[in-house]
Image (tube, rainbow, N blue to C red):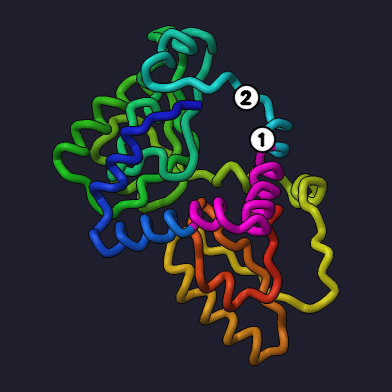
Amino acid sequence: IVDNNKNSIRKILHTNKKDLFLKFKRKFLYELKCRTDSSFSKNIALRKKSFQDFMDAIPHTEVCNASNVHKAYGDAFDILITGSDQVWNPNWWDAAYFLDFASSATKKVAYAVSLNVDQLSEKDVEYIREKTKDFEKISLREIGSKKLLADIIDKPLHVTLDPTLLFQRNFWDTVAVKPDIDKPYVLIYFPGGKEEINVQTWHTFCKKEGLELLTFPHFQGKYSVADEIHSDIRDYSSG
């Protein structure tokens, strides 16, 4: 696990002022509620514990950062795999996601990585060409990402599944927990933004259809007024 604060700085620089203000506002309200509302803080603590319990069940290396990852894991493994999701998004390049800390004897593989952009600047092109030249294998999550890199990376590129889809349904059935809800409901989950608008829209739909609206309120450390007003069922064990 690589903890690199440079990523946070890059994300801030690529966020417009209005979105940045709303993001800080929601973060501030979240922290304020945690400090002043005992019921709220108890629910958030439940969520954190649920996530930590799940993480503890998965084998991990020790947490490291950009300053010590080379020494800690540079030659610790025969093969290192980077992926998936947006680890190669140029809006927050991070050399660690290109496994630049690996020794020359370590094989490097990219699995189902995503760029989540439609074009690359000349500087981005040079960066990714340099960082991927010693990769053994590279696969992308989207066809668009493959097309974007086809003329940049001089090696075979493949499009493959997100790793969450490699398991059959029976595996996820063993992981999933059936919610204790006895009414018809709609679950919504919008981690990508515009939660306020989406929650209001689905609340209107559910009210019309006689359904309950289930949300994971205030996830990602951000307070949402819509979660308080429009949610019928709030699940703090997930999110």
What amino acid is found at the position of numbered circle 1 in the picture?
Answer: Met
> Which residue corresponds to mark 2?
60
> Which residue corresponds to mark 1?
55
Residue 62 in sight here? yes
On the image, the x and y values in percent for residue 55 come to 66, 35
On the image, the x and y values in percent for residue 167 come to 70, 44
What amino acid is found at the position of numbered circle 2 in the picture?
Answer: His
Q: Which residue: 38% across, 21% down?
A: 66
Q: Which residue: 65% across, 55% down?
A: 38
**Crowding at label 1, few (<14), some or many (≥20) Cα neighbours within 10 Å?**
few
Q: Give the mark, 2 or 1, whose residue is nearer the N terminus.
A: 1
Helix or strand or loop: what does disc 1 sit on? Answer: helix
Tell me, yes or no, whether the two marked residues, 2 and 1, touch with CB atoms within 8 Å. yes
**Crowding at label 2, few (<14), some or many (≥20) Cα neighbours within 10 Å?**
few
On the image, the x and y values in percent for residue 104 come to 38, 9
| Residue 49 is a magenta residue | yes
Q: Which residue: 55% across, 46% down?
A: 161
In the image, taking residue 181 as reference, residue 221 lies left or right, namely left
- Pick the front one: 61 or 152: 61
Q: Is residue 196 above or below residue 50?
A: below
Distance between mark 2 and mark 1 Cα atoms: 8 Å
In the image, taking residue 182 as reference, residue 118 lies left or right, namely left
